[in-house]
Image (spheres, rainbow, N blue to C red):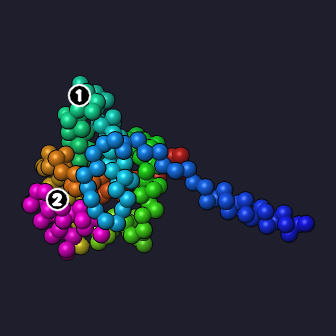
Amino acid sequence: MKKNNIVILIILASFFAGCEEPLDYKFQDKPQLVECPGADKALMHEALYSFQEDIGAYYNKHTDFREGTTNYYLEAYRQYVYFGFSGEAKFDEIASPHSKKVLKKLKEIDGLWNTGNVKTNLNYNYEYIECLLNNIEDKDMKERLLSLKKVDYLSPDMVAEPMRREVLKIVGDEHLAMYMMLDAYYQYLINYDFPEAR
């Protein structure tokens, strides 16, 4: 009898441990222009739009830009590139609960992250990232990023200044925006010590 109870407890425990709440997609009605292998298209676009909404809400608290307009997002990107690429953004204030849920799903993508170091970093050799970099529209920006990748120097710190100067290119290029979102937002969120996680 005791053996049966133990077996039932083990089965129930493994069942409930495996029941993870599915991600509630909020932005699937928006354009999904990036087609790259190695990651779920819907998840990556969800991550991008959640990031844009997070920075839009945070950096437009004191502006007159109407939510959802081009200027609203442009202002958010302008502000974020100065603090986000250096890792000095106020991630605990910027990241929405939805982006934290998206982050959990991004962490599950095998190969997207290098986890062997003290901090988790974006794996620039992962097929999805290589596809993003190879499809950046601006030739100079693409060559700069690929050159840094080739000599193993690609990092948010190394591209911060060019990104700050070329913020309009980020807003106008989905591949570049997707790269930026992963390297300068979710990469930092992975390593950020959120108060509720303590």
Find the magenta span and give its range. Answer: 127-151
**Which one is nearer the viewer's eye here, 1 or 104?**
1
What residue did someone put label 2 on?
Answer: 136
| Between 95 and 195, the one nearer to me in the picture | 95
Q: Position of residue 157 (x, y in %)?
A: 24, 59
| Looking at the image, residue 26 lies above or below residue 17 | above
Identify the amino acid type marked 2: Ile
Q: Residue at horizontal 38%, vertical 59%?
A: 40
With respect to residue 92, does 135 lie above or below? below
What's the residue at 30%, 58% (across, down)?
Answer: 183
Query: Of tags 2 and 1, which is closer to the observer?
Result: 2
| Residue 145, magenta (yes or no) | yes
Tell me the residue that label 1 is attached to.
Answer: 65
Q: Residue furthest bottom?
A: 151
Q: Amino acid at mark 1?
A: Phe
Contact? badges 2 and 1 (CB < 8 Å): no
Q: Is residue 50 visible?
A: no
Task: Give the vertical position of 9 relative to 96 (above or below).
Answer: below
State the image coordinates of residue 2 (x, y, percent, origin top left): 89, 66
Picture quarter containing residue 66?
top left
